[in-house]
């Protein structure tokens, strides 16, 4: 999965790497994590402008895990915090109230685009079945 994300991002942004402060105002630093399964407090995240959690932040969709994830999310210094549900969260009883449960998220993405102040468009969708062969 990490290779697929790298290939996708490389296609979007090209292969040039920028250092902090280079081309000020034209670049952002995105921190992308997923599949933490309630181990988010074990992470040491790098600084960045945007934090994206791409799903499975709970174990088996437990609401207490989601609430602790929300508290942890509020402790992170990233200006924008985006969350996408994984298969563990998608069928949870609390998912209908996800915006309330995840109040420290800038946005919980569900088949929609979020546009940063810099104009970067980030699209996210929940986990879904079935995934058609050849989708990835």
Image (tube, rainbow, N blue to C red):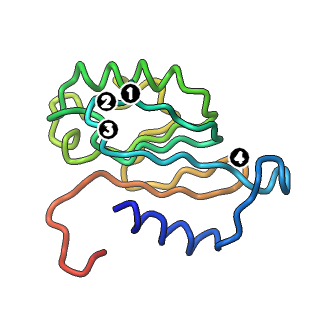
The residue to which callout 3 is attached is 36
From the image, state whether disc 3 or disc 4 is nearer to you: 3
Q: Secondary structure at mark 1?
A: helix
Frontmost residue, 48 versus 88:
48
**Which residue appears at 74% of the width and 58% of the height?**
18
Q: Please, what secondary structure does the residue beneath circle 4 have? A: loop
Which of pointers 1 and 3 indicates the residue nearer the eye?
Answer: 1
Q: Which sits earlier in the primary sequence, circle 4 or circle 1?
A: 1
The Cα–Cα distance between marks 3 and 4, rounded to whole angstroms, is 28 Å
Instruction: Name the quarter where the N terminus is drawn.
Output: bottom left
Q: Earlier in the sequence, mark 3 or mark 4?
A: 3
Q: CA distance from mark 1 to mark 3?
A: 9 Å
Q: Residues within 10 Å of mark 2 (few under 14, many from 20)?
A: few
Q: Position of residue 100 (x, y in %)?
A: 37, 24
The image shows residue 96 at horizontal and vertical percentages of 25, 33
Q: State yes or no: discs 1 and 3 in contact (Cβ < 8 Å).
A: no
Q: Quadrant of residue 71?
A: top left
Q: Nearer the viewer, residue 128 or 9?
A: 9
Residue with the mark numbered 1: 42
């Amino acid at each position: 999965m990490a290779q697929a994300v790298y290939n996708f991002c490389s296609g979007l942004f090209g292969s040039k790497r920028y250092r902090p402060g280079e081309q000020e105002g034209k670049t952002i630093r995105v921190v992308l994590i997923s599949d933490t399964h309630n181990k988010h407090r074990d992470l040491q995240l790098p600084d960045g402008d945007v934090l994206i959690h791409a799903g499975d932040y709970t174990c088996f969709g437990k609401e207490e895990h989601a609430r602790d994830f929300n508290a942890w999310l509020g402790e992170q210094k990233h200006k924008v915090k985006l969350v996408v549900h994984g298969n563990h969260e998608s069928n949870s009883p609390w998912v209908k109230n996800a915006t309330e449960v995840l109040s420290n998220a800038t946005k919980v993405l569900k088949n929609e685009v979020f546009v940063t102040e810099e104009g970067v468009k980030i699209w996210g969708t929940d986990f879904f079945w079935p995934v058609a062969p050849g989708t990835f």
